[in-house]
Image (cartoon, grey):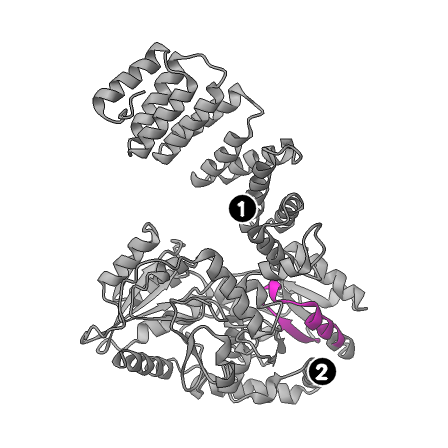
Amino acid sequence: MDTQAGKPAQFGHTITQAWQGSMDFAALLDQAAQLEAEGAGHLAAVLYQTWLSRNTSPYAHAAYFNYALVLSNAGDLSGAEGAYRKAIEIYPAFVQPRLNLGMLYERMGQIDSALDQWRWVAEHTDPAVADQSPLLVMALNHLGRVLETRKQLADASRYLARSLEINPHQSDALHHWVHLQQKQCIWPVYATLPGVSLQAMQQATSALAMLSISDDPQAQLDAARRFVEKKVQSAVPQLSAPRNYGHRRLRIGYVSSDFCLHPVSMLMAELFELHDRSRFEVYGYCWSPEDGSALRQRVIASMDHFRRIHDLGDYDAAQRIRADEIDVLVDLQGQTSGARANLLAYRPAPIQITYLGLPATTGLPSIDYVIADRFLIPESAARWYSEKPLYLPDIYQVSDRKRTVGARPSRFDCGLPEDAFVFCSLNNNFKYTPEVFAVWMNILKRTPNSVLWLLADNPWAQTNLCAAAQAHGVDAARLVFAGRVLPPDYLARYACADLFLDTFPFNAGTTANDALWMGLPLLTLCGRSFAARMAGALLTAADLPELICYDLKSYEEKAVALAQQPSECARLRAHLQTVRSTGRLFDTTAFARHLESALEGLVQAL
């Protein structure tokens, strides 16, 4: 057989064989594979098309499947869809084209059609059949992944649990299942799964999910390092050396997928605007969704240079950043959703810093510093961070003083009793833990005319929280749930609460900033990890150390005492009004100058 079928003359001979019906199926596969290897996928598609139109074969379904793969790789999604459907028409029990068709539909944005294909696989594939079991697992994992993004959390959990029953040794599926447990407030989070040990669950827990499970900074460092070991490239070229470019204005670059209506941008927007343009040139590198929000437009307008790199691979994006000769690159993701750790691995800037995205160590070798204050990361705790703390003098967290606040609602509007003491914890539900929830129930029992105002993140969490309240002997009607609203209306709600009860070990971050900005006293429980010290850092900058507790008993006693002392709550509110206007916590201009001085020091030291 001719081994140069990719050349024009030889391809003519090959296509003639297909046309004349003298090419068997094995030869078709060989010739098509060779054409693809030579970069001639379009000719491979022509070959399959010719062979299928001119030959009758018991393997036609397989040929259509391969034809679909070639078309898909070439970007002909409509043609690939037709070929997959033809393969299924010929052989309805053929599982693989249905699996791939689902992925194709997802790529085309037809999510319901994708789910239909994967559900067919889930319902018609026997896990006991050796060659079908891996395909079934893939379909179940796709269902779990996509349904989680659609907030159909119970179904997502069910599909992932079924996948893990078939193959318990899937750390990626397991880490999603664990986080889904947290999101739905299914306690204990590490529930029993057949064939999955507690150790396996702990080892699979993501860096983000670990923040709500453990206050042990070593456990968080270990989780971050496991991610790096599994997911982050190491043997890649380093695009920049530790050198000072000598720019007249220092070039600072911010990279993020959250330059949109997201908590990171809600905190950062004014900082971008306040950078001293006589000393700094500000670049934004973005792969964020185009959500059309006013906040996104504000962020874009605040940058001197705004680069959309969503369509660039990690290496090409890193090359783009390197070409701009960025002095300091600030990653606003860490290991959160949308992160591009492999972009950072190419080290496109001589100094690379993590900020805000993940309230923990990233474990990334490519990150040199983490922005902190000395309450957030005491010097004695620095050994649990892969980065060096870059200490700012007052507070690690920046604030936006221009945030818009909506019209104040009434308690009636919010479903709250007019005369009750309102505790609130408007945090993401995955931050709620059974240990702290039990203390909240004790607080309610000790303050009879009170309610607890929580975020209605999803109906499964709400149901489980109500059941947990009843198990603690508290009427579920004393839990009031607030649906999600736009940021101005969310901020306005805080006027209806009396005391914010913080979560532990994953404190409120942006939410704590919002509550304090709106003058709502916040009671926190402080631990050892970054996430467990965030609210304490804010309260320290607000000169309110009396609202920082260090054990559950003190936390409970302080909450009860405040509910019984309206004059003390009023004093705290008045103090927060002063902090808002003249305090360190919300002095964004001072924050910008402190950060700029720190960055200049790093560059000068190169």
Q: Residue furthest right?
A: 473
SS at mark 1? Answer: helix
**Horizontal arrangement in the rendering, residue 414 relative to residue 394 (left or right):** right
Give whichever of 29, 51 is nearer the camera.
29
Earlier-in-chain disc, 2 versus 1? 1
**Residue 61 highlighted magenta (yes or no):** no
Name the disc covering residue 538, or none. none
Give whichever of 66, 376 is nearer the camera.
66
Instruction: Tell me if residue 375 comes above or below residue 140 in the rendering.
Output: below
SS at mark 2? Answer: helix
What is the x, y in percent for residue 409? 57, 68
Name the disc covering residue 146, or none. 1
Give whichever of 195, 138 is nearer the camera.
195
**Horizontal arrangement in the rendering, residue 277 relative to residue 290 (left or right):** left
**Looking at the image, can residue 450 be seen?**
no
Q: Quadrant of the N terminus?
A: top left
Dividing the picture into quadrants, the one containing residue 184 is bottom right
Residue at left 29%, top 53%? 316
Q: Amino acid at mark 1?
A: Val
Instruction: Tell me if residue 206 comes above or below residue 111 in the rendering.
Output: below
Dividing the picture into quadrants, the one containing residue 567 is bottom right
Q: How many marks?
A: 2
Q: Amino acid at mark 2?
A: Lys
Disc 2: which residue: 553
**Horizontal arrangement in the rendering, residue 126 relative to residue 512 (left or right):** right
**Residue 440 highlighted magenta (yes or no):** yes
Q: Residue furthest top?
A: 20
Q: Which residues are magenta?
A: 420-442
Categorize mark 1 by other alpha carbons within 10 Å: few (<14), some (14-19), many (20+): some
Dividing the picture into quadrants, the one containing residue 558 is bottom right
